[in-house]
Image (spheres, rainbow, N blue to C red):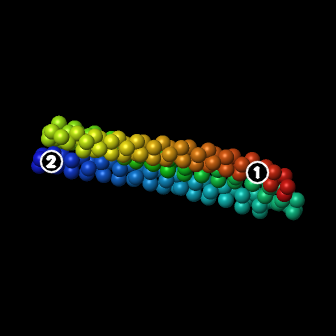
């Protein structure tokens, strides 16, 4: 049974965790806003340059060359933007997962302390029940670890797929430019 002091301490720790996660989320949003402002500013400058270049074109062949020349940089910029978005999301998710893992480990440690205390104070003849509780706790811990491993593997696969798609988009742009 928890004492009033333990309950207050646990509540305080939960609030601190919540505020920590909220701060991490806001940091991610700040990075996203900063990235989008940089992209918007760069896009405005590039639009002005492209408009000036288009207005100075003398014939259709020059216009086609101008358009073809814009494909590769546009694909590279789109890939770089996607990469930045992914990095921001991955970093924020990693921070949240780290806090979740720490919180879960702390909760598991406290629960195991309660189980150990209960086992020590268990009446004689309850060995089978104690063994069952310990077995259930071990199974839950194994399941949690398996879920963590599967989640990490899924994240690694998503990262690899993202890299492959980004690379193929950037590589396809020169082919499209040559075809144009």
- Quadrant of the image containing the C terminus: bottom right
Question: In the figure, is residue 80 to the left or right of 90?
Answer: right
Q: Nearer the viewer, residue 87 or 146?
A: 146
Q: Nearer the viewer, residue 71 or 136?
A: 136
Q: Residue at x 81, y 51 (%)?
A: 175
Residue at mark 2: 2
Residue 123 lies, in percent from the top left, at 14, 41
Q: Residue at x 40, y 45 (%)?
A: 144
Q: Quadrant of residue 160?
A: top right
Residue at mark 1: 172
Q: Residue at x 36, y 46 (%)?
A: 140
Residue 122 lies, in percent from the top left, at 16, 41
Q: Nearer the viewer, mark 2 or mark 1?
A: 2
Q: Residue at x 79, y 49 (%)?
A: 174
Q: Earlier in the sequence, mark 2 or mark 1?
A: 2
Q: Nearer the viewer, residue 69 or 22?
A: 22
Disc 2, SS:
loop
**In the displayed structure, would residue 170 be above or below residue 131?**
below
Can residue 95 be seen here? The reply is no
């Amino acid at each position: 049974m928890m004492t009033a002091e333990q309950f207050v301490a646990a509540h305080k720790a939960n609030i601190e965790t919540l505020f920590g996660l909220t701060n991490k989320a806001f940091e991610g949003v700040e990075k996203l806003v900063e990235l989008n402002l940089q992209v918007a500013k760069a896009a405005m400058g590039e639009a002005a340059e492209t408009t000036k270049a288009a207005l100075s074109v003398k014939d259709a062949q020059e216009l086609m060359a101008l358009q073809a020349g814009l494909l590769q940089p546009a694909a590279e910029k789109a890939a770089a933007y996607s990469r930045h978005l992914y990095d921001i999301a991955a970093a924020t998710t990693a921070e949240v997962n780290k806090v979740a893992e720490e919180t879960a480990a702390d909760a598991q440690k406290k629960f195991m302390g309660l189980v150990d205390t209960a086992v020590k104070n268990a009446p004689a003849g309850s060995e089978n029940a104690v063994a069952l509780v310990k077995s259930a706790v071990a199974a839950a811990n194994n399941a949690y670890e398996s879920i963590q491993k599967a989640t990490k593997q899924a994240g690694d696969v998503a990262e690899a797929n993202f890299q492959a798609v980004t690379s193929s988009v950037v590589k396809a742009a020169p082919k499209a430019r040559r075809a144009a």
